[in-house]
Image (cartoon, rainbow, N blue to C red):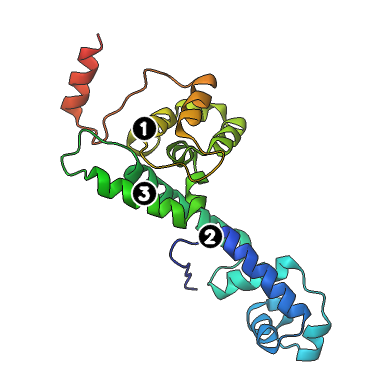
């Protein structure tokens, strides 16, 4: 079975689609009933009248959307969306954070792309603790640390700890409750190492030189 997700898939948007499908099913919309019959194994072969008389659950509509996208179940599609977000969230961090050791780094262009990515897909700013730190999503950071306190110093993209993502980010706050300054303060309050550092390109010689200079 071939699976297919849209570019920049949004779980919230898929949930809204499922609720819309549920409303149309309840209203007896012919096109919707046809979709249900074609995608939901429990309702295959049912007449329009039988489908219209059924009590559609949201879970049924979620399953239909998952099957239409080629997934066996809603949890399977949800996992695929979350996995996609992780990759794009790492890209957000890559674009948002200032970098001194990459000669090809175009600061203004990259930061503008990060800002645009965050504006159109704000969910990426809360996909993981590194993206949340780079976007200043304080509540999301607090939630991640509540679930796993050791994330506070865990290396992410390029080996960056969350504190580095907050300190080197150059994106503007997406709205109220977003602040990289507050994000950095929260991380420090929760045990982030204030001496954290890394080298983006992981150059062994540069890393050795940096380590030697610290002794």
**Mark 3 vs 2: CB contact within 8 A:** no
Depth check: give the residue in front, 66 or 13: 13
Label 1, label 2: how far apart the Cα atoms are: 26 Å
- Mark 1 Cα shell of 10 Å, populated few (<14), some (14-19), many (≥20): some
Q: Which residue is mark 2?
A: 10
Name which residue lies at 36% across and 32% down: 160
Q: Position of residue 174 (x, y in %)?
A: 49, 46
Q: Position of residue 172 (x, y in %)?
A: 42, 42
121 horizontally vs 203: left or right: right
Res. 27 visible in picture: yes
Looking at the rendered structure, the secondary structure element under dot 2 is loop
Of discs 3 and 1, which sits in the foreground?
3
Looking at the rendered structure, the secondary structure element under dot 1 is loop
Q: Which residue is mark 1?
A: 160
Q: Which residue is mark 3?
A: 114
Label 3, label 1: how far apart the Cα atoms are: 17 Å
Decide: is 168 above or below 4: above
Is tag 3's residue or tag 1's residue first in the polypeptide sequence?
3
Res. 76 visible in picture: no
Decide: is 112 above or below 184: below
Work out which residue is located at the far top of the displayed protein and give it: 215
């Amino acid at each position: 079975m071939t699976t297919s997700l849209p570019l920049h898939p949004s779980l919230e948007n898929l949930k809204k689609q499922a609720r819309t499908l549920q409303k149309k099913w309840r209203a007896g919309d012919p096109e919707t009933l046809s979709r249900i019959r074609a995608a939901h194994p429990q309702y295959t072969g049912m007449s329009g009248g039988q489908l219209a008389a059924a009590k559609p659950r949201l879970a049924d509509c979620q399953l239909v959307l998952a099957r239409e996208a080629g997934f066996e179940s809603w949890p399977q599609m949800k996992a695929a969306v979350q996995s996609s977000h992780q990759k794009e969230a790492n890209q957000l961090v890559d674009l948002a954070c200032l970098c001194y050791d990459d000669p090809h780094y175009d600061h203004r262009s990259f930061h503008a792309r990060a800002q645009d990515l965050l504006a159109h897909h704000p969910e990426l700013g809360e996909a993981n603790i590194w993206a949340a730190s780079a976007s200043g999503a304080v509540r999301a950071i607090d939630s991640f640390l509540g679930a796993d306190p050791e994330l506070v110093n865990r290396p992410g993209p390029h080996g960056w700890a969350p504190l580095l993502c907050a300190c080197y980010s150059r994106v503007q706050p997406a709205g109220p409750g977003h602040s990289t300054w507050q994000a950095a303060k929260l991380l420090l309050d929760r045990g982030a190492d204030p001496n954290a550092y890394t080298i983006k390109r992981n150059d062994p010689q540069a890393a050795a030189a940096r380590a030697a200079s610290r002794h």
